Amino acid sequence: MAETKTYPVMHNKNAYITEANYSELYARSINDRDNFWGEQAEKYITWFQKWNQVMTGDFENFNVEWFVNGKLNACYNCIDRHLAKKANQIALIWQGDDPKESLTFTFAELHEKICRLANVLKKEGIKKGDRICLYLPMIPESLIAMLAIARIGAVHSVVFAGFSAEALQNRILNADCRMVITANEGLRGNKIIPLKENVDAAIQHCPKVSKVIVVKRTDQAVSWDATKNIWYADALAQASADCPCESMDALDPFFILYTSGSTGKPKGILHTLGGYLVQVAMTHQLIFNYEAGDIYWCTADIGWITGHSYLVYGPLCNGATTLMFEGVPYYPTPSRFWEIIDKYQVNIFYTAPTAIRALRHEGDEWVKKTKRTSLKLLGTVGEPINPEVWEWYYHTIGNSHCPIVDTWWQTETGGIMISAYPFATPLKPGSAAWPFFGVVPQIDSLGNLTLQHPWPGMMKTVYNDPERFKEYFKNNAYQTGDNARYDDDHYYWITGRCDDVIKISGHRIGTEEVESAFLTDEAVSEVGIVSVPDEIKGEAIYAFVTLKQGVTPTDDLKKQLIHAVRQSIGAIATPKYIQWADGLPKTRSGKIMRRLLRKIANNDVSDLGDLSTLADPDIVKKLISERLTSI
Ligand code: WT7
């Protein structure tokens, strides 16, 4: 593979991690693990009671525990402890979908609202450990709700507001949620999302949901069941602004967040409190070199782990000013991100490669209208960034003076695992670079990336499914599901998933989930889903569909199938190609050979590999001859 060029380190007198101290700290994080992490835990977190053991357990017994018997509260760490010195500092800048609409909240203002909502939750009978589902747009109330739930020791399960009612229902049921917090409607790129309507549909089959708290985001009236529905603003107005923080155990469940695996339904990744908070506070400070007064903007939605770790918990733990944006990058124009950077003088900007690709595609004139001189550092996350796009981000957005941190991590890891250190790592475009402290990556003979040692932010389990949790561990190592390579300069390059997980615009989708969605339509007999490259979204869905006897394949039927997928998952899983297939390639034992489908969809058919188990070679020939090149 052709090596790209290397950008030398930019020196910064305020750098926490430098070329001089990285190796020593990294070595300590591995060789003197307990002392290293004990120090970090004291530095970044305020504990009500100190732990008596930094870590116990191992991967082999699935029983890793961090900061045993430590007591703390996430909301206390994110809000209360900053009040003495920073009560009037802006903690949250909110930029609405409409450029004219924006708000700011100081730490004191957030504190008041969080306490009021926490009291509302208590009044409704919510107790420590109860699960509450959030189905909210990117509005301040979403951050307030997460922290209010954390304050009383309940557990949030945030469901991305782009998921369908059916997907929402599955997640509510799986986590056994007692309450849902939503908005009447969401607003994105001037489009309306009927959130309350989706919640109403979802909870028809969720008898345990006794109350739905509704934020009034727009003036639109919604159907109302007075026995179940509560207006957020009315309830807050009546609640006291005084609510103590619950003292929680470091190992208490903190939140559940659903993500896709290669098989089965989405899994509820459960994070516990202590280790997670240490990991996200520390990585937020060191990877983004966050300094007091910096304006920090992470564009991720709160429905994903990046929103949890690097929009809410990491930055607020560090007393940062965090920016939340309700809208989309291309509304009203493709200058939107850059205008927001200028408007608020953003210093640190963290986004996904798919957004950068899409905006690059729109042309430089949209960027040139803005200055972006406040920027000090850029970050990416969610999928590999190709070197050309990296160069554009670096030169055109960052004016060639901001380091880029390409951060590799996962919902399961809680925080960043592999990344450049902004003022210590010479940058190689397209490489995620170096392991974070305490992280020991290894690449096995198949090119699969594994992590050898436990780290504080790792998930505790898969909610309600300990067996699926166990599947992550083999040979005493955590299996990431990614392929990677390691170069001669000790840099890691993540090349993509090694399983049946697809990344569409950075969103993680399981092929089997999409197949199940197709099968909800009565016309479908069998379906095989694979991914193909997409210039903007990174990957896209290519579906091979066999219809039941007697069903005529038509364009209208394709539309109907797309509709079925959107109904059962959401718009992010919309298939790009649907190819009708008389039959799918199968082994003689009847298993669909997805490997062959992948090759056919990607027009990579010169070498189909070992076909000795293929039951009917004619099927493959036919599929190749009918491959789609346009939608
Ligand atoms: C998968 C995890 C981590 C927060 C957002 C995604 C891919 C993530 C990178 C990167 C190459 C990346 C991997 C990983 N991924 N970051 N910097 N370079 N690939 O979290 O939804 O749990 O997805 O995203 O494939 O396994 P997630």
Image (cartoon, grey):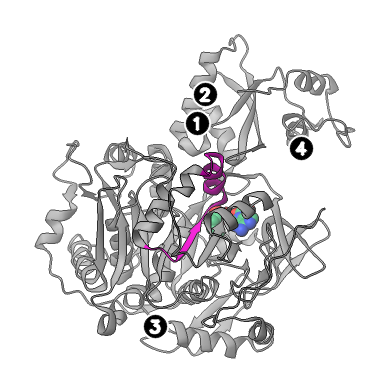
- Whole-angstrom CA distance, mark 1 to mark 3, is 44 Å
Count of labels shown? 4
- Asked if the residues shown at circle 1 and circle 2 are in contact, with their CB atoms under 8 angstroms apart, the answer is yes
- Whole-angstrom CA distance, mark 1 to mark 4, is 23 Å
Label 1: which residue? 565
Q: Is residue 346 magenta?
A: yes
- Asked which quadrant contains residue 202, the reply is top left
Q: Is residue 55 above or below residue 118?
A: below
Amino acid beneath label 2: Leu
Label 4: which residue? 595
- Asked if the residues shown at circle 3 and circle 2 are in contact, with their CB atoms under 8 angstroms apart, the answer is no
Amino acid beneath label 1: Val
Label 2: which residue? 561
Would you call the spot at circle 1 few (<14 residues within 10 Å), some (14-19), or many (20 or more)? Answer: many
**SS label for mark 2:** helix
The x and y percentages for residue 20 are 66, 86
User: Which of the two discs, 3 and 2, labels the residue nearer the N terminus?
Assistant: 3
